[in-house]
Amino acid sequence: MIKISVNETVLEIEESTTISKLLTKIKSPSEGIAFAINNKIIAKELWDAYDFNSNDQVLIIQATQGG
């Protein structure tokens, strides 16, 4: 198990957790979001292959509509 920070909340996850699995675990939608790890945006096509490292800082940004 490793610890990562997701939007400033510390989570403990399996080392083999992918971004897609993390989104399912935290019940986050996978559409309309941007995903950054350590201030670097991760392209959606890489979400099933990315491996987290201990102490990664994750930021999930949800797109919203407004005017």
Image (spheres, helix red, strand yellow):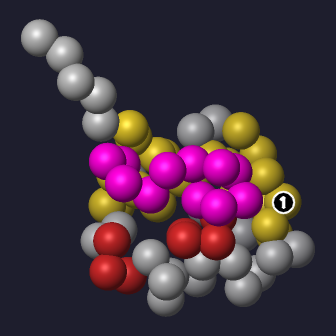
Is residue 9 visible to us here?
yes
Check the image and report above or below for 13 versus 50: above
User: Which quadrant of the figure contains the N terminus?
Assistant: bottom right
Check the image and report above or below for 59 versus 42: above
Name which quarter of the figure residue 17 lies in: bottom right
User: In this orientation, which residue lies closer to the viewer: 17 or 27?
Assistant: 27
Is residue 53 visible to us here?
no
User: Which quadrant of the figure contains the C terminus?
Assistant: top left
Residue depicted at 55% across the width and 70% down the height: 19
Check the image and report above or below for 30 versus 15: above
> According to the image, label 1 marks what residue?
12
User: In this orientation, which residue lies closer to the viewer: 24 or 57?
Assistant: 24
Left or right: residue 26 versus residue 29 is right
Query: What are the residue bounds of the magenta stretch?
Result: 23-33
Residue 32: % across, % down: 32, 48
Mark 1: give few (<14), some (14-19) or many (20+) Cα within 10 Å. Answer: few
| Disc 1 element | strand
Name which quarter of the figure residue 15 lies in: bottom right
Magenta stretch holds residue 25: yes
Residue depicted at 36% across the width and 49% down the height: 33
Residue 50: % across, % down: 50, 82
Residue 64: % across, % down: 29, 28
Q: Amino acid under label 1?
A: Glu
